[in-house]
Image (spheres, rainbow, N blue to C red):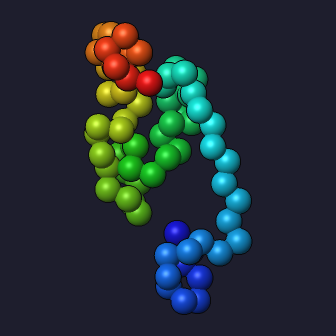
Amino acid sequence: MDQGDEGDGQTANADYSIRVAAGIGAFTCDEWNGFAGTARGDSETSYNPLVSFSFLSALEDSGCAVRRTGWQ
């Protein structure tokens, strides 16, 4: 994140877009793996398997992470 000249945590000249999706299936594996930390081999960010496409997809497919069980 660009912290500007002051280093106060404020982002300089950044445009963001937020998209709310009904589930992980709204993304392709390649789209999801474009996010930092979601895929192995991302040299700048350490891999977190708990946010990987495979893991989240398996949670939804098994019925563990769905609206009925309290997940939004």
Total label count? Answer: 0
Asked which quadrant contains residue 58, the reply is top left
Nearer to us in this view, 62 or 33: 62
Residue 66 at least partly seen: yes
User: In the rendered view of the protein, which quadrant contains the C terminus?
Assistant: top left
Horizontally, residue 58 falls left or right of residue 6, namely left
Q: Decide: is 64 above or below 38.
A: above
Q: Decide: is 26 above or below 12.
A: above
Provide residue 62's location: percent of width, then percent of height. Answer: 31, 10
Horizontally, residue 3 falls left or right of residue 61, namely right
Asked which quadrant contains residue 10, the reply is bottom right
Q: Decide: is 34 above or below 63.
A: below
Residue 58 at least partly seen: no
Question: Which residue is located at x 36 percent, y 27 percent?
Answer: 56
Provide residue 31's location: percent of width, then percent of height. Answer: 57, 36
Provide residue 28's location: percent of width, then percent of height. Answer: 55, 27
Question: Which residue is located at x 32 percent, y 49 percent?
Answer: 47
Question: Which residue is located at x 41 percent, y 15 percent?
Answer: 67
Horizontally, residue 18 falls left or right of residue 64, namely right
Provide residue 46's location: percent of width, then percent of height. Answer: 32, 56
Asked which quadrant contains residue 70, the reply is top left
Question: Which residue is located at x 36 percent, y 38 percent?
Answer: 51
